[in-house]
Image (spheres, rainbow, N blue to C red):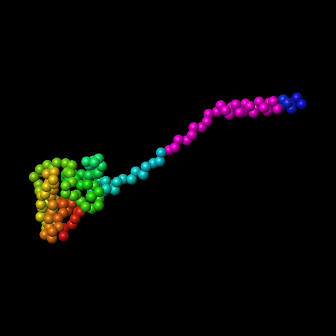
């Protein structure tokens, strides 16, 4: 019997030692949730601006809302969504750069005459100027939009 009691004691000590050792091990840290990646889709109006040779500038209106302007190397500036929709540069849009006199005619005004229109310089309420190309049939287009093949078409 003594041997049976000895075996039970040894078995009990082994179980106790196993529980003790298991209690001393480190618990695995809970997995941290991973951040979901964002879609990263580009604004199609901004992409269109760059494809047409412009650079995008984000501006804020009086109420704090943001809008994009597409600035071209020739000094013209268009609201990017109007440009994307094919409306061209609308009169009254703020110019981002001051034009310098280079002793050459305005190519948009020259083109207006070549397609049968008459160039007219108009003023915005803020005093800035823009050119409109007026046609005999009564239609008129912003000169640079006509020159770049955007917006309205003659006749």
Residue 155 vertical placement versus 107 (above, below): below
Magenta residues, start to end: 8-34
User: How far across and how far down the image is residue 139, in percent?
Assistant: 17, 67
The residue furthest left is 103
Any part of residue 59 in sight: no
User: How far across and how far down the image is residue 29, in percent?
Assistant: 57, 37
Q: Residue at x 84, y 29 (%)?
A: 6
Quadrant of residue 132 within the rendered picture: bottom left
Q: Image check: 82 left or right of 126?
A: right
Using the image as rendered, state which of residue 107 and residue 128 is in the foreground. 128
User: How far across and how far down the image is residue 3, in percent?
Assistant: 87, 30
User: How far across and how far down the image is residue 8, in percent?
Assistant: 82, 32
Q: Give the dominant element type of the magenta stretch: helix, strand or loop.
A: helix
Using the image as rendered, state which of residue 7 and residue 73 is in the foreground. 7
Quadrant of residue 27 within the rendered picture: top right
Question: In this figure, what is the number of numbered marks?
Answer: 0
Quarter of the N terminus within the rendering: top right
Quarter of the C terminus within the rendering: bottom left
Q: Image check: 25 left or right of 136?
A: right
Residue 134 lies within the magenta run: no
Q: Residue at x 26, y 54 (%)?
A: 79
Residue 22 lies within the magenta run: yes
The residue furthest right is 1
Q: Residue at x 18, y 60 (%)?
A: 142
Any part of residue 63 in sight: yes
Q: Residue at x 40, y 51 (%)?
A: 40
């Amino acid at each position: 019997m003594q041997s049976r009691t000895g075996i039970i004691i040894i078995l009990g000590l082994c179980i106790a030692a196993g529980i003790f050792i298991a209690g001393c091990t480190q618990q695995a840290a809970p997995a941290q949730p991973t951040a979901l990646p964002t879609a990263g889709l580009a604004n199609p109006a901004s992409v269109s601006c760059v494809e047409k040779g412009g650079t995008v500038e984000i501006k804020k209106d009086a109420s704090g809302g943001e809008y994009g302007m597409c600035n071209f190397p020739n000094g013209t500036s268009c609201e990017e969504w109007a440009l994307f929709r094919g409306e061209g540069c609308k009169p009254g849009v703020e110019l981002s750069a001051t034009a310098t006199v280079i002793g050459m005619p305005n190519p948009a005004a020259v083109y207006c005459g070549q397609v049968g229109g008459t160039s007219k310089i108009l003023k915005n309420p803020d005093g800035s100027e823009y050119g409109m190309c007026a046609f005999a049939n009564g239609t008129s287009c912003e000169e640079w939009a006509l020159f770049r093949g955007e917006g309205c078409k003659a006749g």
